[in-house]
């Protein structure tokens, strides 16, 4: 029985369910602890917390997902128990969202030059005020009939090596861990290895060394029980997490994306013990902070 899902997106980034719809869905699947982890935004959290009041058995961990670049690839960093009142952090997130906006517009321009007629206005409407991401562009391409599913947009046009891909302002994984540590959030590496569902993404090169390095900056865990990972992938990551003594986390990374075979909330996630361990690490860190 899956009780925990620590990776979920809403309309405040590139998910298609509102926080209320997502919380209700998670409750109906019997989940007990969920983390709402929108890209570069914590703005969906108040609505999610309010919706959770109708479900006394469900706890929400406030979270965030940051995207970082490494040569030829990306690493995403989750932050758990994020302090949403941290104004400096919120200003940084706003900058990231502006970067997403500019980059989205450039990608639409590139698509137009390739003869794919979608409008930037429509992409903004689809994003509905949320942090703009490639899935919004993919959705516009689906609507216009160029592709059948959003995933095809990544395979053909806006994946890292696609003809309409545009980079975002660079952030390193160390920068992201630093931002989260400064906020008081617990940094956890997202989807560390290849995922079938997100085909433009490879595994992190030199995973062990990268994790060791990031642990020095304050990384506390990585995703192990993730999305569509096979049991071989989970076993491989579990071993590394054990070896480095970092917390094995995970979740569905559900976006209600409209892609066939998308992992659903309630079908994948870490054990409750993971949440207990995160809480322990969190209290140790706050004791450390108050002593220093
Ligand atoms: P962005 O934040 O604009 O770089 O877009 C990244 C988001 O696009 C991820 O969080 C996923 O939601 C989605 N995504 C990335 N790669 C794929 C893929 N190959 N197929 C479908 N969705 C993807
Ligand atoms: Zn996403
Ligand atoms: Fe991600
Ligand atoms: Fe995600």
Image (cartoon, rainbow, N blue to C red):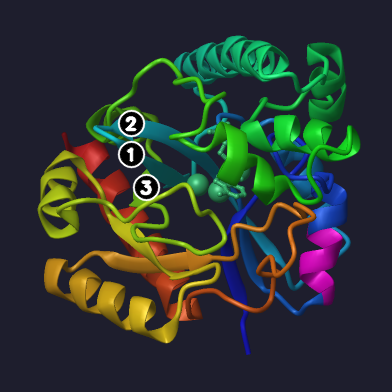
Mark linked to residue 69: 2
Is residue 207 in view? yes
Question: Judging from the image, what secondary structure is the residue with disc 1 in?
Answer: strand
Q: What is the magenta range?
A: 23-28
Tag 1 and tag 3, C-beta contact below 8 Å:
no
Question: Judging from the image, what secondary structure is the residue with disc 3 in?
Answer: strand
Residue 146 point in image, percent of width and height = 81, 37
Relative height, residue 196 to residue 282 (above, below)? below
Mark 1 Cα shell of 10 Å, populated few (<14), some (14-19), many (≥20): some
Tag 2 and tag 3, C-beta contact below 8 Å:
no
Tag 1 and tag 2, C-beta contact below 8 Å:
yes
Q: Which residue is mark 3?
A: 186
Q: Main secondary structure of the magenta part?
A: helix
Ligand 1 - quadrant of the structure image: top right
Relative height, residue 279 to residue 138 (above, below)? below
For image coordinates 31% across by 45% down, the residue present is 286
Question: Judging from the image, what secondary structure is the residue with disc 2 in?
Answer: strand
Q: Is residue 197 left or right of residue 187?
A: right
Q: How many marks?
A: 3
Residue 22 point in image, percent of width and height = 80, 56
């Amino acid at each position: 029985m899956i009780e925990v899902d620590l990776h979920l997106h809403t309309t405040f980034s590139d998910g298609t369910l509102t926080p209320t719809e997502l919380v209700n869905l998670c409750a109906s699947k019997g989940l007990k602890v969920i983390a709402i982890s929108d890209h570069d935004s914590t703005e969906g959290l108040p609505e999610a917390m309010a919706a959770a009041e109708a479900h006394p058995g469900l706890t929400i961990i406030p979270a965030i997902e940051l995207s970082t670049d490494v040569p030829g690839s990306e690493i995403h960093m989750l932050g758990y128990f994020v302090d949403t009142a941290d104004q400096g952090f919120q200003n940084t997130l706003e900058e990231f969202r502006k970067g997403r906006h500019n980059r989205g517009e450039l990608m639409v321009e590139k698509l137009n030059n390739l003869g794919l007629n979608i409008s930037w206005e429509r992409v903004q409407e689809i994003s509905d005020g949320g942090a703009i991401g490639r899935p919004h562009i993919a959705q516009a391409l689906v609507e216009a009939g160029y592709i059948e599913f959003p995933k095809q947009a990544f395979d053909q046009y806006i994946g890292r090596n696609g003809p309409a891909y545009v980079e975002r302002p660079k952030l390193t994984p160390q920068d992201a861990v630093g931002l989260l540590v400064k906020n008081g959030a617990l940094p956890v590496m997202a989807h560390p290895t290849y995922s079938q569902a997100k085909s433009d993404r490879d595994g992190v090169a030199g995973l062990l060394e990268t994790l060791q390095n990031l642990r020095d900056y304050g990384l506390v865990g990585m995703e192990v029980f993730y999305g569509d990972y096979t049991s071989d992938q989970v076993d491989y990551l579990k071993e590394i997490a054990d070896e480095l003594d970092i917390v094995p986390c995970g979740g569905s990374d559900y976006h209600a994306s409209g892609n066939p075979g998308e992992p659903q909330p309630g079908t994948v996630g870490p054990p409750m013990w993971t949440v207990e361990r995160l809480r322990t690490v969190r209290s140790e860190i706050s004791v450390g902070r108050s002593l220093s």
